[in-house]
């Protein structure tokens, strides 16, 4: 296989891998009824005038399947942490006892589970679109090599088939991730 073709293939795989990783990252933000520190991943706290990630200024963990516990490293920041959680509009009511903040993750209603399942499906579809766009771009680059006579028509067809196989693999992986998350959400 042509060295340039290998570079395109490796690049396509890397980009598809990133699309899959991004999907997994986005799905951690969609709660499945269980408490997880990842739910607060995007919360930013006003820490002496600069917005700082909550995880960089406090211990965030779970005490049980339904409770998130936040312990700021500086007790005087507890009010700011509480404000930031409320401002993030995650649907949580933080309880501040002066030293730690507890968040009890509410049970999901059937309607809310359905909505979240749709959100998961939508995120999965976005990932599939990204993978298909990568396939399209890579095939266009391969066809360009064929046009400029750097690779033969047969080699081009073979590489396009390989790209399609890789695309199908990643699409199957995305489906697997989506199915697992949806089962997690729908289980009571």
Image (tube, rainbow, N blue to C red):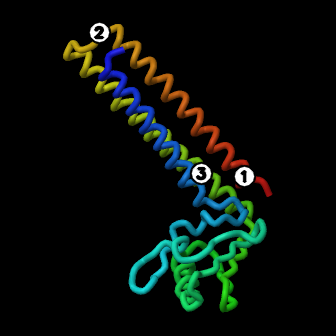
Nearer to the camera, 66 or 110 = 66
Query: Disc 3 or disc 2, which is closer to the eye?
Result: 2
Residue 144: quarter of image = top left
Residue 49: quarter of image = bottom left
Could you tell me residue 140's position as x and y percent?
30, 26
Disc marking residue 82: none
Which numbered disc flags the more N-terminal residue, 1 or 2? Answer: 2
Could you tell me which residue is drawn at 43 percent across and 37 percent down?
A: 14
Vertically, is 82 above or below 168? below
- Horizontally, residue 157 falls left or right of residue 149, namely right
Q: CA distance from mark 3 to mark 2?
A: 42 Å
Q: Which residue is mark 3?
A: 120
Could you tell me which residue is drawn at 41 percent across and 13 percent down?
A: 158
Q: Which residue is mark 1?
A: 184
Residue 13: quarter of image = top left
Could you tell me which residue is drawn at 67 percent across and 62 percent down?
A: 112
Vertically, is 145 above or below 124? above
Could you tell me residue 157's position as x and y percent?
38, 13
Query: Disc 1 or disc 3, which is closer to the eye?
Result: 1
The crowding category of the residue bearing disc 3, from other C-alpha atoms within 10 Å (few below 14, some 14 to 19, many at least 20), is many
Q: Which residue is mark 2?
A: 152
Q: CA distance from mark 1 to mark 3?
A: 11 Å
Nearer to the camera, 2 or 39 = 2
Q: CA distance from mark 1 to mark 2?
A: 48 Å
Per the image, label 3 sits on a secondary structure element best described as helix
Nearer to the camera, 79 or 127 = 79
Per the image, label 2 sits on a secondary structure element best described as loop
Vertically, is 124 above or below 94? above
Query: Disc 1 or disc 2, which is closer to the eye?
Result: 2
The crowding category of the residue bearing disc 1, from other C-alpha atoms within 10 Å (few below 14, some 14 to 19, many at least 20), is some
Per the image, label 1 sits on a secondary structure element best described as helix
Could you tell me which residue is drawn at 49 percent across and 26 percent down?
A: 166
């Amino acid at each position: 296989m042509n060295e340039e073709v290998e570079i395109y293939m490796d690049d396509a795989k890397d980009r598809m891998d990133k699309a899959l990783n991004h999907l997994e990252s986005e799905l951690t933000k969609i709660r499945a009824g269980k408490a997880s520190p990842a739910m607060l991943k995007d919360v930013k706290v006003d820490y002496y005038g600069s917005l700082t990630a909550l995880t960089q200024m406090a211990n965030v963990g779970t005490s049980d399947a339904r409770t998130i516990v936040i312990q700021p490293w500086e007790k005087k920041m507890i009010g700011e942490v509480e404000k930031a959680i409320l401002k993030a509009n995650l649907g949580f009511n933080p309880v501040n006892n002066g030293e730690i903040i507890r968040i009890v993750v509410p049970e999901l209603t059937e309607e809310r589970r359905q909505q979240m399942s749709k959100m998961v499906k939508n995120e999965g579809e976005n990932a599939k679109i990204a993978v298909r766009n990568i396939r399209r771009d890579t095939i266009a680059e391969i066809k360009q090599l064929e046009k400029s006579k750097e690779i033969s028509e047969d080699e081009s067809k073979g590489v396009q088939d390989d790209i399609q196989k890789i695309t199908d693999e990643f699409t199957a992986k995305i489906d697997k991730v989506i199915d697992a998350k949806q089962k997690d959400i729908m289980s009571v």
